[in-house]
Image (spheres, rainbow, N blue to C red):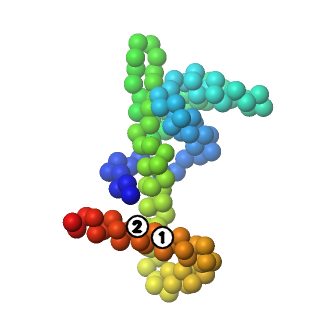
Amino acid sequence: MAPLPNYRPKQLSVGPLEAEILQIIWELSEVTVKDVHDRILADPSRELAYTSVTTVLRRLTEKGWLACNKNGRAFYWRPLVTKQQSEMIKAHEQLQRFLAVGNPDVVAAFADSLDEAASEQIQTIAKRIQAARQAREE
């Protein structure tokens, strides 16, 4: 089980276009504005201004999702976290917000409302947590 990454973007929330562009960057590893713009416009039903892509890349950089490097006259963006790390961070944040309710009755009511498949999934997660704790103690 991979540990929770030490680095976290400053702002976790991303809009739909930001999420789409992040997905493209995760697939390509490093991109220019043109790379992203061309990928989006590969869908003939889509329209998106080149400047809009630039704006979104800058916004994702400000939020801490991307790093930008200049090579010659071109700017290249790369992700600061992998897709898997992103999912781990977001899941951790959601769980922390849920547990912040602080009322054991609410948490118990939630657990009681789970169907059998979700209960089995939680049991599997609990076993992995226990194994990770035991591995840390060794």
Label 2 element class: helix
Q: Amino acid at mark 2?
A: Arg
Task: Say which of 116 and 14 sits in front.
Answer: 116
Q: Amino acid at mark 1?
A: Thr
127 above or below 31?
below
Residue drawn at x 50%, y 72% is 122
Q: Position of residue 82 (x, y in %)?
A: 44, 43
- Left or right of residue 114, residue 132 in this image: left
Quadrant of the image containing the C terminus: bottom left
Q: Is residue 2 visible?
A: yes
Residue drawn at x 54%, y 80% is 111
Task: Say which of 79 and 121 sits in front.
Answer: 121
Mark 1 Cα within 10 Å, few/some/many (few <14, many 20+)?
few
- Left or right of residue 67, residue 49 in this image: right
Q: Is residue 51 visible?
A: no
Seen from this angle, which residue lies furthest left? 138
Task: Say which of 10 and 29 sits in front.
Answer: 29
Q: Tag on residue 128?
A: 2
Q: Position of residue 93 (x, y in %)?
A: 45, 61
Residue drawn at x 54%, y 74% is 120
Q: Which residue is mark 1?
A: 124
Asked if labels 2 and 1 touch by Cβ distance under 8 angstroms, the answer is yes
Q: Tag on residue 52?
A: none
